[in-house]
Image (spheres, rainbow, N blue to C red):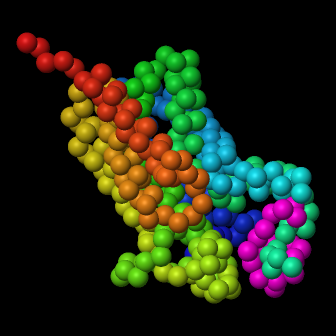
């Protein structure tokens, strides 16, 4: 883990946010290069990328607050901090990181003061990828319609870069310690230190005696998703792009393949993500996106001439 990637002039640069911006930069460059190849205005892509970055962060944060299981914690942080429990030791509660109030009766730490805008601190982590994707798609359509740029063409230009950007983002998750997997004793299992998100979750689930202990080894879900995203980016860029039969096909392949990979990986994740009908929120969204990709593909696929 390395939550803080580096520090310049006492300004902290969180690993997750730095990798997120790195992925965004690569995604934008790839889209611009392909826009020029097909004779489209790259300035539209730059405008689209900046708008999608802003909307993606907003959407990712909104979905995190609403669907990751922390909604009432954010409410209570503003209304009654004593109802928010941090499962850390007394020493850690008093540390610079938490600066909380120790509850000896319950054996947990509470925030020392109200934090009404904690829900908006996206730079500290807590972004749901699908929330960012939904907001970016909706906002992108509006922007492209205004610029009279075919949304399906723009989607095809963006798809490989978005997948590549996600690969960088998941490495940011690895460094931040979030999006961790279920316990595993396999040869590729990862170990996270004490007081990491994995350690805190396992202590809360009574798998560990204390958050002061290193976490049990877990499935390397962040690494697997990063590799899966790289594979999706390569397939869309090197195979589908040159063989597409209609505008939008590259993007639909991206949605379908990523949705399939994400649906399977969710069974190996152990972090709080919200649930619905026995599935995680992300699995439900994955199923919806895969279904939508198949339906739209069938509608847009050119009919054979008889």
Splitting the image into 4 quarters, where does residue 246 fall? top left
The residue located at (49%, 52%) in the rendering is: 278
Residue 276 in percent (x, y) is at 54, 47
- Magenta-highlighted residues: 81-104
The residue positioned 44% from the left and 72% from the top of the image is 219
Q: Decide: is 306 above or below 255.
A: above
In the picture, measured across the screen, residue 114 lies left or right of residue 161, that is right
Residue 76 quadrant: bottom right
Q: Is residue 226 visible?
A: no
Q: Magenta stretch containing residue 82, yes or no? A: yes
Along the line of sight, which residue is nearer the eye, 59 or 66? 66
Residue nearer the viewer, 103 or 165: 103
The quadrant in which the N terminus is found is bottom right
Q: Nearer the viewer, residue 121 or 30?
A: 121
Q: Residue at x 66, y 54 (%)?
A: 69
Q: Position of residue 144 (x, y in %)?
A: 51, 23
Q: Is residue 98 above or below residue 60?
A: below
Task: Tell me what residue is drawn at x 52 percent, y 32 percent.
Answer: 137
């Amino acid at each position: 883990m390395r939550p803080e990637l580096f520090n310049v002039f006492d300004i902290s640069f969180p690993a997750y946010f730095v990798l997120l911006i790195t992925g965004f930069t690569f995604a934008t460059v790839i889209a611009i290069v392909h826009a020029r190849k097909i004779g489209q205005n790259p300035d539209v892509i730059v405008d689209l990328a900046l708008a999608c970055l802003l909307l993606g962060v907003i959407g990712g944060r909104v979905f995190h607050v609403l669907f990751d299981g922390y909604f009432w914690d954010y409410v209570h942080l503003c209304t009654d901090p004593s109802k928010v429990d941090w499962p850390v030791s007394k020493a850690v509660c008093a540390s610079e990181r938490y600066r909380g109030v120790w509850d000896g009766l319950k054996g947990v730490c509470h925030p020392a003061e109200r934090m009404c805008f904690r829900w908006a601190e996206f730079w500290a982590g807590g972004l749901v990828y699908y929330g960012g994707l939904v907001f970016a798609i909706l906002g992108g359509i509006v922007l492209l319609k205004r610029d009279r740029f075919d949304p399906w063409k723009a989607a095809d230009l963006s798809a490989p870069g978005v997948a590549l950007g996600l690969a960088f983002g998941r490495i940011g998750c690895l460094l931040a310690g979030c999006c961790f997997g279920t316990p595993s004793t396999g040869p590729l299992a990862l170990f996270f230190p004490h007081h990491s998100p994995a350690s805190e979750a396992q202590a809360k689930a009574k798998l560990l005696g204390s958050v002061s202990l290193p976490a049990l080894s877990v499935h390397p879900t962040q690494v697997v998703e990063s590799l899966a995203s790289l594979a999706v980016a390569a397939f869309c860029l090197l195979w589908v792009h040159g063989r597409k039969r209609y505008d939008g096909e590259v993007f639909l392949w991206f949605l379908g393949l990523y949705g399939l990979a994400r649906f399977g990986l969710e069974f190996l994740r152990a972090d709080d993500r919200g649930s619905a009908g026995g599935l995680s929120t992300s699995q439900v969204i994955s199923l919806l996106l895969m279904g939508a990709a198949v339906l739209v593909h069938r509608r847009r696929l050119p009919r054979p001439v008889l």
